[in-house]
Image (cartoon, rainbow, N blue to C red):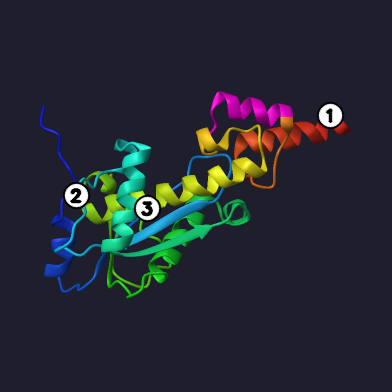
Amino acid sequence: MMVSLPDFRFETAALHSGSRRAAGVDEAGRGPLAGPVVAAAVVLDVRHLPGGLNDSKKLSAAKRDLLADLIRTQADVGVGIASVSEIDELNILRASHLAMQRALDALKTAADHALIDGNLIPRDLTIPATAIIKGDALSLSIAAASIVAKVQRDAIMVDLAQQFPGYGWDQNMGYPTKAHRQALQDLGVTPHHRRSFKPVHNILYQDKNVSR
C-alpha cells in the first residue's frame, strides 16, 4: 500500500489565488486534562523545505525535536499559547482558536492566508483561511506547525512535571492515562488541571460532597 505524505498543493493553491505568504497552523493539547493548549503557525520557504516533514503523531520524539529545530531555522515560525484558565473560561475549541490567532500574530512577517488544521476556521481571524481536515497529514506547512506545537507543548509539560511530581506529565503530557487519573484521585487537582474537563470537575465535585 502506498503511503501518502504531505505536500505543497494547498500552499500552491493559495499562492495562485493571490496570496504571497500562506501559513500552516495547527495546535497541540486539545485532549489533555492538564496544561495549556499550544499552537504554531509556519510559513515555509519552498526553496528550503526541511526533509521528512509529516504529521507529528507519525514521528518519534527524537525526529520531532530534530525537525522542530530545522523548521525554526529555515522558516518563519510563530507560537501562541492559551492558558488553562482561558481553556476553562472559553472552552477548549475557542481557546485552541485563540492560540492559533496568537501564533499567526507572532510570525516575524504577517501571513496573508492561513491553512488551518481541522474543519473550522477561527472566527476572529482577520485574513483569508482554508480549513483542511487532517491537514497535518496533507499540507507540509500544517505538518511543520504540528511538529513545532507538539515539541513546544511537550517541553512545557516536562517542565511542569518537575514542579508537580507524581502525575507523570513528562510521560503522558497531561493526557488522561490510567496513571494520571489515579494520581488525580490520590494527589488531587493542581492549578494546571483543566477544571472544565469532566474527570477533573468530577473529582472537585466529589471532594466538595465529601467535605460537607
Residue carrying label 1:
210
Secondary structure of residue under mark 3:
helix
| Residue 101 percent coordinates (x, y) | 42, 65
Instruction: Please rate how many residues cluster around mark 3, counting C-alpha atoms within 10 Å: few if below 14, some from 14 to 19, many from 20.
Output: many
The first of marks 3 and 1 along the sequence is: 3
In which image quadrant can residue 8 be found?
A: bottom left
Residue 123 can be seen, yes or no: no
Labels 3 & 1 near each other (Cβ < 8 A): no
Q: Amino acid at mark 2?
A: Gly
Where the C terminus falls, by quadrant?
top right
First in sequence, mark 1 or 2: give its number.
2
Q: Is residue 85 visible?
A: yes
Q: Residue sitting at 41 percent across and 47 percent down? A: 150
Question: Is residue 104 within the magenta segment?
Answer: no
Q: Main secondary structure of the magenta part?
A: helix
- Judging by the rendered image, the residue that carries numbered circle 2 is 51
Please state the extent of the stretch shown in magenta in the rendering: 175-186
Q: Nearer the viewer, mark 3 or mark 1?
A: 3
> Viewed as shown, does residue 158 lie left or right of 2?
right
Q: Are marks 1 and 2 in contact (CB under 8 Å)?
A: no
As drawn, 108 above or below 46: below
The residue identified by callout 3 is 148
Residue drawn at point x = 66 percent, y = 28 percent: 183
> What is the secondary structure assignment of the residue under circle 1?
helix
Q: Residues within 10 Å of mark 2 (few under 14, many from 20)?
A: few
Q: CA distance from mark 1 to mark 2?
A: 55 Å
- Front residue of 67/185: it is 67
Mark 3 or 2: in front is 2
